[in-house]
Image (cartoon, rainbow, N blue to C red):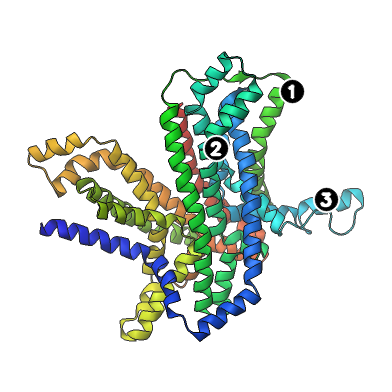
Amino acid sequence: MPRRWLSLSSMLLAAGLLSLPVLAVLGSWTQWDAETAQILRELRQTVLPGYVGTTLALAAMVGVGVVLVGTGAAACVTLFDFRGRRTLEWALLLPLAMPAYVVAYAYTDFLQFSGPAQTWLRESFGLRGRVLPEVRSLGGAVVVFTLALYPYVYLLARTALAERAAHLLEAARLLGAPLGRRIRQVALPMARPAIAAGAALALMETLADFGVSSYFGIQTFTAGIYKAWLAMDNRIAAAQLSTMLLVFVAVLLALEQRAQARLRFASARGRAGGHDARAVPLAGWRQALAQALCAFPVLMGFVLPVAFMLRPLSADWSVLPWDRFVQWAGNSVTLGALTAVAAVALALFLAYCVRRTPERLQRAAVQLVGLGYAVPGAVVVVGLLLPVGWLQQAAPELGAAYWVTATVLGIVWAYLVRFSAVALQSMQSGYARIPRSFDDSARTLGAGGAALLARVHWPLLRRSAAAAALLVFVDVMKELPATMVLRPFNMDTLAVVAYQLARDERLGEAALPSLALVLVGLAPVLLLSRTLRSRG
């Protein structure tokens, strides 16, 4: 019994620490007074309408874009057979390796007024002034987010069409339904929950973004939160804006969970029957059209941004800051490795506790930890610094502000809040493949508690733990909002340096850390594509 209470107490403590940022942001409203009311009125009369309008417009246009591109690509590679389809199936995942802010830097460098594209057009055709539309605009942000985030919709829609609608499409074909009707009345309705779930994930990433919105000068909630905290030095305004952003995220999270529930229902129905649907062979102009539709997002979302960043690197390698690059990469790897180890250990502990005692309180604690991935980095920063500020005022001798802002403790804590859910999901998936009869047999042989975990579970969970560590490591390497505020002094990372160089219009120098982030991001993409090919 004492061991059980110790385990439960540790679970609740971990869940409390990882949910503290959200609770602190919500708890800031309990300090309601005349000053807080005045700040809210000023926000409502000045910047708040712009934040709401811009955020809603951005989310609406990005949602339409990722649905059109992701669903169209998924339908092409699933329902039709054409030359190059197998290659394009995994190539369409490559933009997942590109952080959205890296895509923004690449296109800005190439398409801005002084960039190579406009310079060549003016010199070749005798034009003057601006030739192409402004990249750093709301429309440019929509294009960047669409190219970087459509794989969320593509991946889920492709799985739904290939695994869940297959036998229904085949039945409709045998009943004489034409191709257009099969797509319109069978394939799309079956894939609708997957499309909605993918779009919700893409929109949560859009709302959480800071790099693109700040670099393009777009007044979204995330940019407003940083402006209120760092420029205006008003933590109450930052907390109020964070709460409003959490409302948007909560709506999207509810939509995503509802879509996932409908997706599981459709999956259960879809596995009831028989054969796979035959892909319709294409030839001639139809084959060329399908190839172009699938190759276009890969070209625009991965190939061209990489080529744009390689251009300044190939010009003069000697001017690149190689010595500082090694330091930036070392800082990024250190933070990523520390967080990956801590996240895997925490996820293993939580998953084991739920496996051992799957009661309501334990499951609720794990679900609470799993929600952290949906919380934007800006909200995590505000939610961590608010209680630290309160504690610093109440007990300055503890030095809480020092430990959170001047050491790696604060930034690793913020990373764990955001990315423990990634490790937890991987470990729970690994546990789902271990029969409970193994536990019973081990206990019969006298192995229980720590021995059961070390000698039975861990050998079977090593691959899941490695995958979890890889995913957390890559997410930490690419994280920008939390790293910018909470990193210790003189500990710049690749993501922070790339943002600072791009902000200072030193886009050629920003290409080196940006390409390093892309190379790191390729690892989970290749792992995912390998998994999909093995399933196929």
**Mark 2: amino acid:** Arg
Which sits in the foreground, 30 or 398?
Answer: 30
Q: Describe residue 29's horizontal placement relative to residue 135 as left or right.
A: left
Q: Quadrant of the N terminus?
A: bottom left
Residue located beneath label 2 in the image: 192
Q: Which mark is residue 285?
A: 1
At x 41% / y 57%, what residue is drawn? 372
In this view, 289 is above or below 514: above
Residue 60's spot in the image, x, y percent?
Answer: 64, 52
The number of numbered badges drawn on the structure is 3
- Give the distance between the C-alpha atoms of the residues marked 1 and 2, in whole angstroms: 29 Å
SS of the residue at dot 3?
Answer: helix
Q: Describe residue 353's horizontal placement relative to residue 107 as left or right.
A: left
Asked if one can make out residue 234 in the rendered structure from this viewpoint, the answer is: yes
Residue located beneath label 3 in the image: 120
Mark closer to the observer (3, 1): 1
Residue 71's spot in the image, x, y percent?
Answer: 60, 36
**Mark 1: amino acid:** Trp
Residue 84's spot in the image, x, y percent?
Answer: 61, 25
